[in-house]
Each structure stands twice: as C-alpha cells, then as structure tokens.
Amino acid sequence: VAAVTSPIRQNEYVKSEPCFYYLMRTDEDIAKSASDAKPQNMDCLVRMRNGFRMEDMDSFLEKMKYVLGSKKEKAAFPTDEDFAEGLKTKNIYTMPTRYKAYIFERLENGDSSEYKEIYNRLDSGEYTIEHIMPQKLTPAWAAELGDDAESIHDQWLHRLANLTLAASAYNIRYSNSSFQEKKTMKDGYLQSGLKMTQQIAKADHWGLTELEERYSSLIQQCICLWPYADT
C-alpha cells in the first residue's frame, strides 16, 4: 500500500489511483491483508511505483476486483448498503492520519478540475480536521441540538457527517463556538476556501436533521468515488 500511496500523494501515476481506491473501500482486515501480501503480490504493487506499465492496468484491476470479491464473511467486500451503514457509524476522527487525509482529499477534490492541495496542508498543520459540533458540549450547543443533545453529541461527534476541513488557526481560536459564530466569524465557514465547508455554511442550524442530511449527501459522493467492485 505504501508503494502505491507515495506517487499518489505526489499527484503522479494518475492511472494507478483506481487500484488504490479499490483497496481503500475495505475494512481493516482487508487493509491488513494487503500489508501481509505474499512477495509476488507485493512485487506487483512495487512495480506500480517503478514504472508499472499502463497497458497492464486494466488486467491488474480486474484481478484485484476478483480477489476482493472472493472474500467472505468479515473480509467480504462491502455492498453499497453495507458501505453506507458502516460509514454512517464509523469513528472517522480517530482513524490513522493518512486514512483521514485520503478521505478528505477525495471528498474535497473528487473529479473536479480545480485541485485543492489537501495532503501537504494537513501534513504541515495548515489544515486540520474540524468538528462542526465541538468535542465539548457547551450550553450553547446543548441548546442548538435540543432535548436529545447528549445522545446526539455522543453518537455523531466523530462521524464523517460532523467533520470537515478548516484552517488550523481558525480551529484553535473558535473550536467551541456556536454554529452561527463558526459560520459568520472572520475566516469562518462562509469565508472558507474549501467547498465542503462552504456547503455546511448553507445550513441555518446544526442538529440531528442536518447531520443526517449531510451523511446522505456524503455517502452518495463516497459511493461514486469508491464504487462497488463488480467483476
């Protein structure tokens, strides 16, 4: 996986990206199986970095899809329904940094021709992963969330629907601010240069309804980015 990751982070070998996408749409058991691959399998990954022939890519992807599709039980390649349900409840915030960077880079850039540098800015600390509903349930946020504030906070805090990208300086200064303050303050959501954060700024309020709506929107985007591996 590292052999594939390095050129992608440098925006090279563009045609190798689909293989990496297929690998990423797996659970941790499948990801571990890649790191434990037999030498002949790892050789294929290494050759992707050291001049993997483009004409071999289609064949390689078909073989990769067959291997993933043949997994059973816990290692089975998830259907769209399983993928959606797993992503809804997954604790994204505590995932390894490189996984989070990959997810948020893809969600921000997708197939857009307007590329926004995410990896290096996360690595350098210029960007950070921001909790929309903050980690501390303040009185203002308890009022924002309503009667089931504690339950909503506990369940949704670290899920993808409650996370976005933000400038580190903004996040440190205003991380516990109310939703309206996060939207309208200097360099807040309304002034963000990030598309995903600008989208959040369109909401008038942030509660369970908005979290569920954002989840639905993000899961559709994720299914398009990481489609089911039909063989």
Image (cartoon, rainbow, N blue to C red):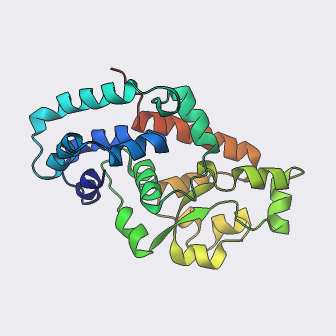
Q: Is residue 2 visible?
A: yes
User: How far across and how far down the image is residue 106, in percent?
Assistant: 40, 49
Snapshot quadrant of residue 163: bottom right
Q: Residue at x 79, y 62 (%)?
A: 141
Identify whether 196 is placed above or below 18.
below
Numbered label tally: 0
Identify whether 97 is placed above or below 41.
below
Q: Residue at x 34, y 49 (%)?
A: 35
Q: Residue at x 58, y 50 (%)?
A: 160
Residue extending farthest to the right is 147
Q: Nearer the viewer, residue 204 or 66?
A: 66
User: How far across and how far down the image is residue 190, in percent?
Assistant: 57, 62
Residue extending farthest to the top is 231
Snapshot quadrant of residue 44: top left
Q: Is residue 186 visible?
A: no
Q: Nearer the viewer, residue 132 or 13?
A: 13
Where's the C terminus, which quadrant?
Answer: top left
User: How far across and how far down the image is residue 152, in percent?
Assistant: 78, 50
Side of 153 relative to 51 (left or right): right
Q: Residue at x 41, y 54 (%)?
A: 102
Q: Nearer the viewer, residue 165 or 27?
A: 27
Side of 149 relative to 20 (left or right): right
